[in-house]
Image (cartoon, helix red, strand yellow):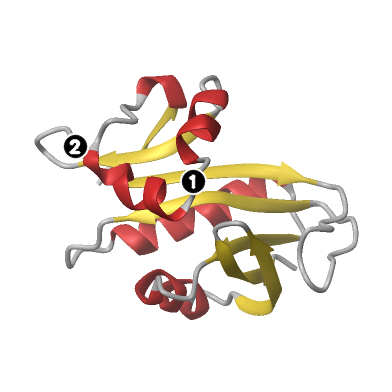
Amino acid sequence: MDLKYLEFHQVSLDDTFFNSLKHDYAEFEQWFKKKSHNRAYVHTNPDGTLDGFLYLKREDEAILDVDPPMPPANRLKVGTFKIDAHGTKLGGRFVKKIFDHAIYERSKEVYVTIFEKHAFLLALLVRYGFRQVGTKATANGTELVLVRSMQ
């Protein structure tokens, strides 16, 4: 169950794995292409299709587009996290990678925004200590803001 750390341009945006993200976020394709030289953790099926994708980003500034706003802090943002669950420990493996990355970055906390409809992923994050601290209203709908302290 190896995760690869690849640049976005090494991952096919045409993979059907991304269809739900394209549906949920109107700007997803444009955003993905803009990140072409950024890296993400990916996991593939034996046939080469994606079944996991994780993009992480360090953010030190105040987060003002959430309610309530979050003050400046050394934090790690989970920018994109999606898995196709199929009865394995893939979700836990990706969460461990989030924590490993946060420890490496010496982040004080990790945060993620997520639509409430993603119940499986939401439950996974809560199981690993994330808690809701607010909401984020966007043109795509309202997302929950979850935070996990690393202290």
Residue 52 appears in the rendering: yes
Residue that lies at the very extreme toward the front in this rendered image: 139
* Percent of width and height locating residue 1: 24, 47
Residue 51 appears in the rendering: no
Classify mark 2: helix, strand or loop: loop
Is 96 located above or below residue 132 in the figure?
above
Is 111 located above or below residue 26 in the figure?
below
**Residue at 81% over, 56% down:** 63
* Percent of width and height locating residue 17: 27, 45
Q: CA distance from mark 1 to mark 2?
A: 23 Å
Q: Amino acid at mark 1?
A: Ala
Lateral position of residue 151 relative to residue 71, left or right? left
**Residue at 62% over, 79% down:** 131
Camera-nearest residue between 36 and 130: 36
Give the position of the C terminus as an image quadrant.
Answer: bottom right
Camera-nearest residue between 19 and 40: 19
Classify mark 1: helix, strand or loop: loop
Is 47 located above or below residue 74 in the figure?
above
Camera-nearest residue between 129 and 72: 72
**Residue at 86% over, 48% down:** 61
Q: Which residue is mark 1?
A: 26
Q: Which residue is mark 2?
A: 49
**Residue at 38% over, 51% down:** 23
